[in-house]
Structures are given as C-alpha cells and as structure tokens.
Amino acid sequence: MRPSKVFILSALFALIQVTLLDYFKLFGVKPDLLLIAVFLGCLFLDFKRAMFLAISTGFFKDIFSFRFFGFNTVLFALWVLLLNHLMRRVSIEDNLSRTVVIFTVALLSNVIAGLALLYLGAHLPVGGFLRIVIISPIYTVLIFSLIIKYFVK
Amino acid sequence: MFKPSKNQLKLILFSFLFFLFLIFFLSFLRKPAVSTIGAPLGWFNILKREIGGIIFYHRNLKENIALRKEVDFLNNKINSLNECRLENVRLKENLAFKNRSALKLIPAQVILRSPDNWSLGFVVDKGSHHGVRAGMSVVSYLGLVGRVIETTSSNSKIMLLSDPSLGVSGIVQRSRQEGLVFGTLGSSLIMKYLPEEADIKLQDIIISSGLDNVYPKSILIGKVVEIGKEFSGLSRYALIKPAVNFSNLEEVLIVVP
C-alpha cells in the first residue's frame, strides 16, 4: 500500500468518524476508524511518517472528543512506538496476525479509556462499560478485515 | 359438397346480421355474448401486443431507458421533497416550542458528532458570536438535551445528557421526589440517590428541578421504566427512558439564561 493511499484513507476515515459513523452503530457502539488508520500507518509507513500520522489523527480525535484533551494523541503515539518495537521482533505480515494485533490494540485502548473515565468519577454501569469494551474492538476488527480485503494488495 | 345458392347465402347473411342485432340491442343477450367472445378477443389482444413488442422492440427499448431515467429523477425529487417536508415539520415544532416557551432560545444545527464511544455529544453551528456561552443548557421541543461545554466564535460543543459526566437535578413530576440524573453511555438515563422510601413508580415523568441553577425548571427529561435497589442497599435507583432520542437529533435550542 502506497504512503499517499494511507494518508488519503486516514483523512477519509477521520471525516467518516465524526459524521456518518453515528448511523452505523452496532449496539450503540461505533468502530474506531482512526485506530485502523494508525495501524495501517504502522504497517505501511516508515516510523517517522507513522508517528506523524498517529499524532495528527490523535489530535483530530482529541479536538472533537469531550474529555481529557491529549489522551488520544498520547495513546496513538504510544501504540506506534510499541507496534514498531513489536514488528522488529515478530513478523505480522499475514492477515490473521494483523487482525489479532489490531484486536488487542483496540481492546486495550478501550479498557484504558474506560478506566480513565471511571477514575475521573463518571457513573458508568458495568454493562455499559463491558458493552463498549467488547463490541467496539470486534466491530473495529470487522471493518479492518474489509479494508485489508479491498484496499491492501 | 354443400354449395349454397344465392338466396341461401342472403338468408345466412341476414340471419347472422339479425343475430348480431339481437345481441347488441337486446341488453339481456349482450352480456353473455360479450363474455363469450371476450376471452378469445383477450387472447388475440395478447398476441397482438407480443407481436407489436417484437416489431417495435428498438422504439420500446429507447422509451424504457428514458422512462427509467425519469423514474430515477422523480424518485430523487420525491426523496429530497420528503426530506424538506420532515425538516419543515421539525423546524415548525421547534418554532412552536420557542414561541410558547418563556425561555430565550437560540436555534442551532448539529454539524458533527463525537468520534469516540466514551463521550457522547455533538458540535453545533452556533458559537460565542451568536451569544452562546459555555454552561448554557440545551433543549429540544421534546425535552432536555444537554449542556454547552465549550464554544468557539462559530461553533459550540454540546455534551449530551446520556454522557455519564453530566448530572442533572431531576424531580418526579407527580410526587416531587428529588434525585440526580446521569447518563449511562447507552439509550437510558439513571436517576440515583433515591431514598428507600422514595415515592416513585413506573411510568412516572421526570423533569428538571432547576435546583442546580444550570438547567431551567420543569424541562422534560424522561419516563421511569425500571426501579431497583443500589448494590450498597442504602438507596434506590430508577432507569429513565429519555424523552429525546439523542441519536437522531438534528436541530437543538440553546437556552440563554
């Protein structure tokens, strides 16, 4: 996948994330297209470009998020750093290992965001917490699989 | 072989014409006769239509393509008109609410939604330039929507009532029982800190109490759909179905205090 394609896809994902995606919620949960963009950046861009993409998408998400500004910028940058280290040691060239990795990343991102929310004193029911933590990564992985199938050659 | 004479032919022709005359001018005979010859005539018409279809195939094809295009165009037009009609209904309802409400209201349109699952809110097209300030409450003609948390000159961020960070002081309309209403990140709200002996029933209407000095008094929040006991056993809670469907909001009204 060419770097320009990754950047164009990321811009498209950012636009969809704040507009259309609300109409495609599954059990009240939407997938994290920006996380997919960051992961694609890790897979197909060099470290500097991937970091630039992660910081810009994180910043974009923070602008439109409603709490803890900078949370997504830091988290996305951290994921790029960790995934870069992981990819130096382990090969994630096949789609199955890519899917497993993005599921883990999405799950951990949601757990961290949910726990941060609880730590800040929000009244969140266990059911609601688990619904988002479990369904969002699954939905993200499904969308990622479609993107891999149709966009990545 | 039978070969009729001239007179016989005249007789047959006359009988046949007389028979036709009887059929078409005597009403009681017309109906059975028409129904009898109707079926073969129908078959003949089908045959005629099919042959016509083959002969005029190219003309029909062109006509079909043109008509399909016209149908698509008209469907699009119907869709856009329907959208206009729905928008008109919503705006009229907002205007009616604005006219009958004692509150000073600024109408705003939703332009963007929250990108993550852990916060619920949207961005509207009105900002400080239009008189919107952080902390103002947001309503729709159906009930309470949320609160403005951030403004720029032309946009404002509105946190929805269904976000767990937002708490509203609510009361049961029937018994005036107070409680705090929070969001759950789902489709329902939760009213907490209700005492054990709280007078609250299913289908009770919950309205804003106005005690928090943030939200105006008596704005509809929702209806009680479930009552339960807190895990600690010290108090009760009530699940509330919000009056406003937060997922399909397109226009809101910002309350100017």
Image (cartoon, rainbow, N blue to C red):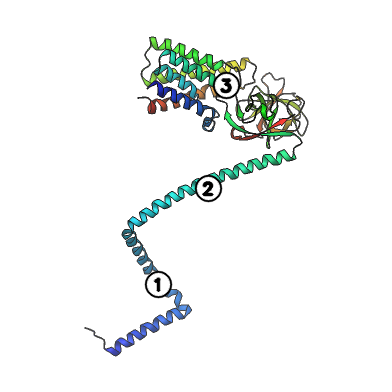
Marked residue chain, label 2 = B
Q: Nearer the viewer, mark 1 or mark 3?
A: 3
Marked residue chain, label 3 = A
- Residue B223 at least partly seen: no
Q: Residue at x 63, y 15 (%)?
A: A120
Quarter of the image holding residue B49? bottom left
Residue for badge 2: B78
Q: CA distance from mark 3 to mark 2?
A: 38 Å
Q: CA distance from mark 1 to mark 3?
A: 80 Å
Classify the position of the N terminus of chain B by image quarter.
bottom left
- For label 2, the SS is helix
Residue for badge 3: A63
Q: CA distance from mark 1 to mark 2?
A: 45 Å
Residue for badge 1: B36
Tag 1–tag 2 contact (CB < 8 Å): no
- For label 3, the SS is helix
Q: Which is nearer the eye, A8 or A40?
A: A8
Whole-percent x and y of residue A24? 51, 32
Classify the position of the C terminus of chain B by image quarter.
top right
Q: Residue at x 31, y 59 (%)?
A: B54
- For label 1, the SS is helix
Whole-percent x and y of residue B43? 36, 65
Q: Which is nearer the eye, B141 or B195?
A: B141
Whole-percent x and y of residue B12? 33, 85
- Type of amino acid at the residue the image marks with label 2: Ile
